[in-house]
Amino acid sequence: MENILKFGKSRFHIRLYAFAWTILETRDKEFDAEKMKEQNWLVIILKAMNFATENECEVMKELVDVLGSKPDVKDELGDIKAALEGKMVIYNNLDPHVLLEEREFLNDK
């Protein structure tokens, strides 16, 4: 029997948040991590869209849609991986659509 991963809402939510945070961290000259920590996650997403490419904005919108269709699943290790995946897309210049896939890609080369 094949082991099929089932990612919950949290996996995609954290991917989205880390992706948006990293866009701001790397592109917003006025980025202030301490101030950002005080912001609601939706404000961070919206602000990141001002610095994102059209392709990245599209992915962020699609990730928001995905959140509405996924169940809540507790997976602390998955949440850690999701944060790394969101950051990895920017730092490794990956196609952001990979964030929409229900697969782990941390070890992809």
Image (cartoon, rainbow, N blue to C red):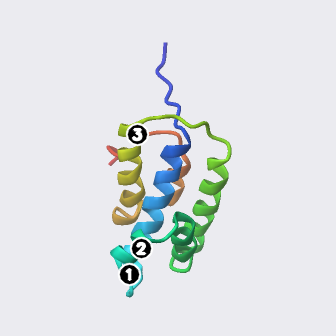
Residue 21 lies in quadrant: bottom left
Q: Nearer the viewer, residue 32 or 108?
A: 32
Outermost residue, top side = 1
Vertical relation: 91 (above or below) 72:
below
**What amino acid does circle 1 point to?**
Phe
Judged from the image, the secondary structure of the residue bearing numbered disc 2 is: helix
Q: CA distance from mark 3 to mark 1?
A: 27 Å
Vertical relation: 11 (above or below) 40:
above
Residue at the (39%, 53%) spot, across then down = 83
- Badge 3 is on which residue? 78
Which circle's residue, 3 or 1, is located before the other in the chain?
1
**What amino acid does circle 3 point to?**
Gly
Q: CA distance from mark 2 to mark 3?
A: 23 Å
Q: Is residue 90 left or right of residue 4?
A: left
Residue at the (34%, 62%) spot, across then down = 92
Residue 98 percent location from the top left of the image = 50, 51
Q: Nearer the viewer, residue 3 or 40?
A: 40
Which circle's residue, 2 or 3, is located before the other in the chain?
2
Q: Dot 2: within a 10 Å radius of its alpha carbon, few (fewer than 14), some, or many (20 or more) residues?
A: some
Q: Is residue 100 left or right of residue 86?
A: right
- Badge 2 is on which residue? 36
